């Protein structure tokens, strides 16, 4: 079966959702915010998007489409940029840019994930030219932003010094000098080359001084309200906020494809203190679809309001105030939004049967607590036999999950995520269930991975799920509730 | 002026109730709403209709939750299990091994469900709502949940972490039942309130019959 063959470039070297993507395209997109609301214009033809801000959303879409991330992003990027784009996904924008420089030299097209083993290996073999190439634009950005202790002439001089050094000792590319950490490079070639060095090898998603210049959304819709009278009661605030959301909608030109990730609610208190609070949505939220009630946005505002009032009451308990410090005005601003044209929603609209995922997403946006969804994993080790997934993201498994989970039928429905050590139980109280061992071949002491599981009954007949580890110590891991 | 329908002419309250229930009688061609596949259990749930609240008494450690779980095995609509157990998380593969479709059953952790999850009860996204051992659940909360369930034609399971008794009743529940595993080979059920009351015993092998 073709699907069962793993492609070479899909062999994963590192797990996880990529944090950034650099997109090169000759064709200008009318919508740079197609993948994320956080975008930087690196150069005339290159955009960098921070995609992990919408990680949950894209993972849910991916699983619902039962496709790979590559196939999913390919659809979206083709829609916006046509076929002539190159997109490189990685954990740091610098790594995206270096690999993009290589792809441009190769005249490749399409999507690359630096997480894949093949791309990672190519990345490690890249020469200095790909590493130096993006530094030209970097120097311009650092200069225009007035980066601390950056001087273009000094930077160029250090670059030349580094070039002479690598020519002298004959190093093929940055990875040949990998053992030199960024502190060593900083000491010899100054701070900014040290930083670039760190960005090249660091696997964390932190920017570590990368000059991120967020591309402003063309219009950042905002409304301001100065109140006639101070208010602190939710029923009054709710009515006024609803009016403000209506005014916000008008600023979007009633465009239904605009979806909001985050809104800023800047509240001015009676003492003229300004407090910034955020209304954030787990799934991109369309304000227009909720005209005129705006239930979701108002629920989020209510959670924020309830928390804020609690804090204000605790802070101002010594003041002679009737209830809590009232509000005298506010400003609501849409700070992060994503543009998802209806055609893209239609692509993913393969609702299965009677489960309406959009309803689930809408409800999730109204709740302050996440809805949990799980799927099984092909693993016999108890804690690894399942995983949490985004809601709406559970697709059909590629294997018979009931066969895998059959080993769990004697295990409890709920378990302790942190097991407590218990005293050694009497032999008559316990009933042996199974012996499990995790991936012992990955550990120095394979025997330490062995656990013997038992049902333990106390004198009142209550049953617990316990295990004995290799040292003979006992732990309670669940309750047969 | 319209005349009062004949069935409401009598002023006796009990007859009003009977006639109101007759109006809302489940249609005979519809199958039972809750089906576990265990005959002795299903007979007690045959009269359950949309909007009903079922109260379960299941103390911890007695494995009694496996009985309500039986009603989530067969082609359930989108459902949610609201749980609150100190330090406990969902052991998902065990649920799957009992035949639960986790594409349709979702979980959410909340100790005060009505206060913290109000939008969930105000909408009909979930047709089965299981409220498992809530920390705070007043009679006002019970009235609200029951009213919303009737409005949205949902079925609500309210699981208590103690055994129920007739001394402290629940007017909102159409069925009240205690369940626990007794010994190594059977489950015991005690129906406190319902169209028939009394004790039932279910062999363990029937509960684990289709598992895995």
Image (cartoon, grey):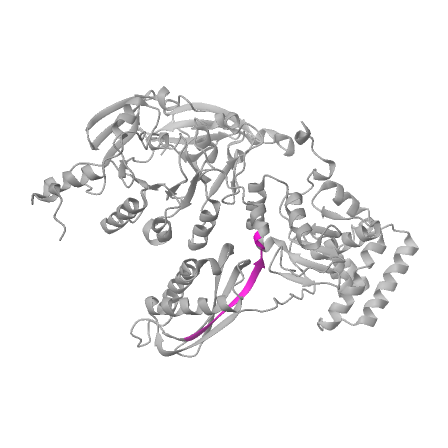
Q: Is residue A437 above or below residue A353?
A: above
B44 displayed left or right of B18: right
Does the magenta-highlighted stretch encompass residue A335?
Answer: yes
A239 displayed left or right of A147: left
Residue A367: percent from left, percent from top: 42, 53
The secondary structure making up most of the magenta span is: strand
Residue A434: percent from left, percent from top: 48, 24
Residue B168 in view (yes/no)? no
For the C terminus of chain A, the quadrant is top left
Q: Looking at this view, name the residue that lies furthest to the front.
A: B1
Q: Is residue B80 above or below residue A2?
A: below
Near-viewer residue (A366 or A34)? A34
* Residue at position x 44%, y 23% in the image: A432
Q: Quadrant of residue B149?
A: top left
Q: Quadrant of residue B6?
A: top left
Q: Quadrant of residue B71?
A: top left
Residue A82: percent from left, percent from top: 71, 52
Near-viewer residue (A137 or A132)? A137
Question: For the magenta stretch, what is the residue range?
Answer: A329-342
B101 displayed left or right of A154: left
* Residue at position x 86%, y 60% in the image: A162
């Amino acid at each position: 079966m073709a699907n069962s063959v793993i492609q070479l470039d899909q062999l994963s070297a590192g797990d996880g959702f990529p944090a950034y993507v650099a997109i090169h395209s000759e064709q200008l997109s009318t919508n740079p915010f197609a993948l994320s609301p956080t975008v930087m214009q690196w150069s005339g033809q290159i955009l960098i998007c921070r995609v992990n801000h919408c990680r949950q959303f894209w993972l849910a879409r991916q699983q619902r489409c039962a496709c790979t991330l590559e196939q999913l992003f390919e659809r979206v990027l083709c829609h916006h940029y046509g076929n002539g784009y190159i997109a490189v996904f990685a954990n740091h924008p610098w790594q995206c840019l270096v690999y993009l420089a290589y792809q441009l030299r190769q005249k490749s097209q399409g999507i690359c994930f630096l997480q894949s083993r093949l791309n990672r290996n190519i990345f490690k073999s890249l020469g200095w030219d790909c590493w130096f190439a993006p530094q030209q634009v970097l120097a311009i950005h650092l200069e225009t932003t007035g980066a601390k202790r950056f001087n273009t002439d000094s930077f160029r001089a250090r670059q030349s010094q580094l070039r002479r050094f690598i020519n002298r000792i004959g190093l093929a590319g940055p990875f040949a000098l990998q053992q030199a950490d960024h502190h060593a490079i900083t000491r010899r070639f100054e701070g900014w080359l040290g930083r670039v060095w760190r960005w090249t090898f660091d696997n964390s998603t932190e920017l570590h001084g990368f000059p991120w210049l967020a591309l402003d959304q063309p219009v950042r819709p905002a409304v301001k309200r100065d109140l006639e009278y101070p208010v602190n009661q939710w029923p009054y605030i709710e009515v006024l906020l609803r009016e403000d959301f209506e005014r916000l909608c008008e600023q979007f030109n009633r465009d239904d494809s605009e979806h909001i990730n985050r809104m800023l609610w800047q509240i001015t208190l009676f003492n003229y203190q300004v407090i910034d609070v955020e209304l954030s949505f787990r799934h991109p939220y369309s304000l227009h679809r909720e005209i005129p009630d705006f239930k979701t946005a108002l629920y989020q505002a209510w959670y924020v309001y309830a928390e804020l009032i609690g804090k204000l009451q605790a802070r101002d308990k010594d003041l002679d105030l009737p209830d809590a410090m009232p509000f005298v005005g506010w400003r609501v601003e849409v700070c992060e939004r994503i543009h998802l044209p209806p055609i893209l929603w239609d692509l993913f609209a393969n609702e299965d049967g009677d489960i309406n995922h959009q309803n689930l997403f809408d409800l999730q946006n109204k709740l302050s607590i996440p809805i949990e969804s799980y799927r099984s994993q092909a693993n016999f080790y108890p804690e690894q036999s399942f995983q949490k997934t985004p809601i709406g993201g559970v697709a059909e498994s590629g294997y018979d999950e009931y066969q895998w989970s059959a080993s769990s039928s004697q295990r409890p429905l709920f378990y302790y995520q942190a097991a407590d050590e218990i005293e050694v139980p009497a032999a008559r109280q316990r009933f042996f269930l199974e012996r499990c061992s995790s991936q012992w071949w990955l550990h120095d002491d394979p025997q330490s991975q062995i656990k013997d599981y038992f049902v333990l009954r106390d004198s009142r007949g209550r049953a617990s799920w316990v295990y004995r580890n290799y040292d003979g110590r006992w732990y309670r891991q669940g309750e047969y509730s | 002026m319209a005349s009062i329908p004949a069935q409401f002419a009598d002023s006796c309250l009990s007859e009003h109730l009977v006639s109101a229930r007759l109006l809302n009688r489940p249609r005979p061609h519809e199958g039972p709403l809750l089906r576990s596949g265990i005959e002795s259990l299903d007979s007690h749930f045959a009269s359950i209709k949309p909007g009903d609240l079922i109260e379960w008494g299941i103390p911890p450690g007695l494995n009694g939750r496996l009985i309500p779980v039986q009603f989530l095995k067969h082609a359930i609509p989108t459902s949610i299990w609201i749980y609150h157990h100190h330090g406990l998380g969902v052991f998902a593969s065990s649920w799957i091994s009992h035949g639960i479709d986790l594409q349709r059953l979702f979980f959410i952790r909340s100790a005060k469900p009505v206060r913290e999850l109000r939008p969930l009860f105000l909408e009909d996204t979930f047709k089965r709502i299981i409220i498992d051992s809530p920390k705070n659940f007043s009679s006002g909360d019970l009235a609200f949940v029951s009213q919303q369930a009737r409005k949205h034609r949902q079925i609500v399971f309210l699981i208590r972490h103690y055994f129920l008794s007739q001394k402290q009743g629940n007017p909102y529940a159409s069925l009240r039942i205690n369940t626990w595993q007794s010994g190594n080979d059977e489950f015991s059920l005690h129906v406190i309130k319902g169209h028939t009351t009394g004790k039932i015993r279910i062999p363990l092998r029937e509960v684990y019959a289709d598992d895995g």
